[in-house]
Image: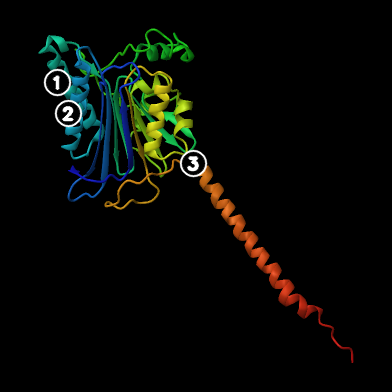
Amino acid sequence: MIRTKHAHLHIAALTHAGMAGRQNEDRLAVSSYQISEDNPARSVFAIVSDGIGGHRAGEVAAEMAVESISHMVANSDAGQPLEILDNAIQVTSDAIATRGKDNTQRLGMGTTCACAWVIGNQLFTASVGDSRIYLLRQAGLTQLTIDHTWVQEAVEKGILDPKDVRNHPNVHVIRRYLGSTQTPQADIRLRLAKNETDTQSRSNQGLRLLPGDVLLLCTDGLTDVVDNADILVTVRGLDLQSAAQALVDLACQRNGKDNITVVLMLVPWGNMPASHALPKIKLASRYWQWLVLGLLGLFLLILVCSGLIWLVFHFIHPIISIPIPIP
């Protein structure tokens, strides 16, 4: 693919170390491309990673994940996006594991990753760990990825009630991550409904995004303290950069101790010229757009009716009221 200066999506990204005074071991990257000289289709690839491991090993693992996966995506032809993502994640995981074995202080280091690849208007996702991807569409928020954690498995098996997840002692026990001794397979389920089967979720890949759709990629430093309802309320009505800042600020206000990273990507209304910088776009729902159009239409109707009434009383009515002489 060919790297481009401007993306066909509007983008905002922000990362924060959190309130515990820890080193920020989160990493992110967003890159835009044209598929090839012969194929003008546009592409955007975004990834967030949350490193794990002491002695700053998590920072190294997260950096490797972001750089390696982004590099392999950039050097692809985008022909088979899911296969490209799965291969990139597995190759990168093995490289992280090898790097950890070569340095005793970094032994056991690892990282999560959540990848969103938008080709034209189609979305492809892959994830490992508990970093998440959400879709904000109209007035709803949908978590597209599934956490690879002990508590998620317990919920799926009916052992744990979903309302008890946040305060459970095993909430941060990750069952799948890059850098593990067993090479992890990328999770390519794109879940649009809770009752979907895994096969149905995988078939959602290539989801066609609509104008006004917003994708949110984030690490668990956000979702540990900010639930889905609060995410939706916080970003509604804000431009992208303000929305990213508001999410980070809310996590900090709630004493979020983990690193916090968010990436927001908005599908613009209409085609954005390639040379156009990325402006701030309001995340207004279609309800408000239709309301404004309806009020405008009502105003125009009142204006037309007022004009007709004025015409009748000033021109037609005097003519009708002139007495006709009787011979």
C-beta proximity under 8 Å, tags 1 and 2 = yes
Q: Give the CA separation, mark 1 to mark 2.
A: 9 Å
**Amino acid type, mark 2:** Ser
User: Residue 198 at x, y = what percent?
Assistant: 37, 24
User: Which picture quadrant has residue 165?
Assistant: top left
Relative to 217, residue 20 above or below: above
Whichever of callouts 1 and 3 sits on the residue coming sooner in the sequence is 1
Tell me the amino acid under the disc marked 1.
Answer: Ala
Residue at which label 3 appears: 285
The image shows residue 284 at horizontal and vertical percentages of 47, 42
Please, what secondary structure does the residue beneath circle 3 have? loop
Q: Secondary structure at mark 1?
A: helix
Q: CA distance from mark 1 to mark 3?
A: 43 Å
Percent coordinates x, y for residue 116 in the rendering: 30, 33
The image quadrant where one finds the C terminus is bottom right
Q: Is residue 126 above or below residue 182?
A: below
Marks 3 and 2, Cα distance to the nearest angstrom? 37 Å
User: Of helix, strand and loop, which one carries label 2?
Assistant: helix
Residue occupying the point 32% across, 46% down:
278
Residue type at mark 3?
Ser
Marker disc for residue 68: 2
Q: Which residue is mark 1?
A: 95
Marked residue nearer the N-terminal end (3 or 2):
2
Depth check: 257 or 35 in front? Answer: 257
Q: Residue at x 22, y 22 (%)?
A: 62
